[in-house]
Amino acid sequence: MLRGGAGTMITRNDEDFYYVPGGRDYSIPKSLMLINEIQEHPLNFCAIDFDKKMVGRKIWYNSQPAIIERYINKQCCVIIIPDGAERFETPAEFIKEPLWDEEDARQLKIDCLAAERVWWFRD
């Protein structure tokens, strides 16, 4: 099966950073908006070695303590693990329809620019 699509790639220092899918009427304005978010993001994507500096950062995910384990290059995503627990608990609003099975709940992949359930600041 062959599939085609359109989108805009945001680059950082001439390297792919984040892909915004959709036609040009959507993806270009969305990319311009996201560039502002990238510049103001708490993970400081404009800093040298930002990807190394964020590893180990303590955050909140769905009101649960978590730690950034690693950054996924070219996707602007992080892998997070629970801090002080074996796995993430299913949020109350999804109890009837779990988002993940028990193995998936040991680590989660989070899109840094679409992380509504993440609070990036935790002591």
Image (cartoon, helix red, strand yellow):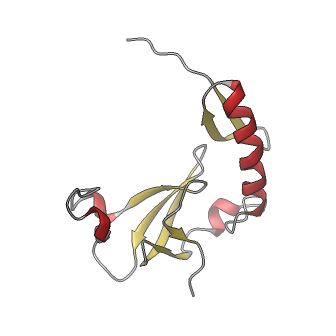
Q: How far from the left and from the top, in percent, is residue 47?
A: 78, 62
Quarter of the image for residue 55 reads bottom right
Q: Pick whichever, 95 or 7, lies toward us.
A: 95
Instruction: Identify which residue is drawn at 52% across, 16% down.
Output: 4
Q: Position of residue 13 (x, y in %)?
A: 80, 44
Compared across the picture, whether 93 is left or right of 38 comes to left
Q: Residue at x 40, y 79 (%)?
A: 83
For the view shown, which residue lies furthest in the top direction? 2
Query: Is residue 15 visible in this depiction of the protein?
Result: no
Q: Which image quarter is the C terminus in?
A: bottom right
> Is residue 9 something one can see in this rendering?
yes
Query: Which residue does the image show at 53% across and 62% down from the upper left?
Result: 116
If the image is split into quadrants, where does the N terminus sit? Answer: top left
| Left or right: 105 in relation to 42 | left
Image side of residue 36 versus residue 111, left or right: right
Q: Residue at x 67, y 32 (%)?
A: 26
Measuring from the top left, give residue 104's x and y in whole percent: 28, 57
Rendered position, 35 above or below 44? above
Q: Is 34 displayed left or right of 71 in the figure? A: right
In this view, which residue lies farthest toward the bottom?
A: 123
- Identify which residue, 12 or 35, lies in the foreground: 35
In this figure, what is the number of numbered marks?
0
Q: Position of residue 106 (x, y in %)?
A: 31, 65
Q: Is residue 29 above or below residue 69?
A: above
| Observer-nearest of 71 and 118 | 118
Q: Nearer the viewer, residue 95 or 53?
A: 95
Q: Is residue 82 above or below residue 35?
A: below
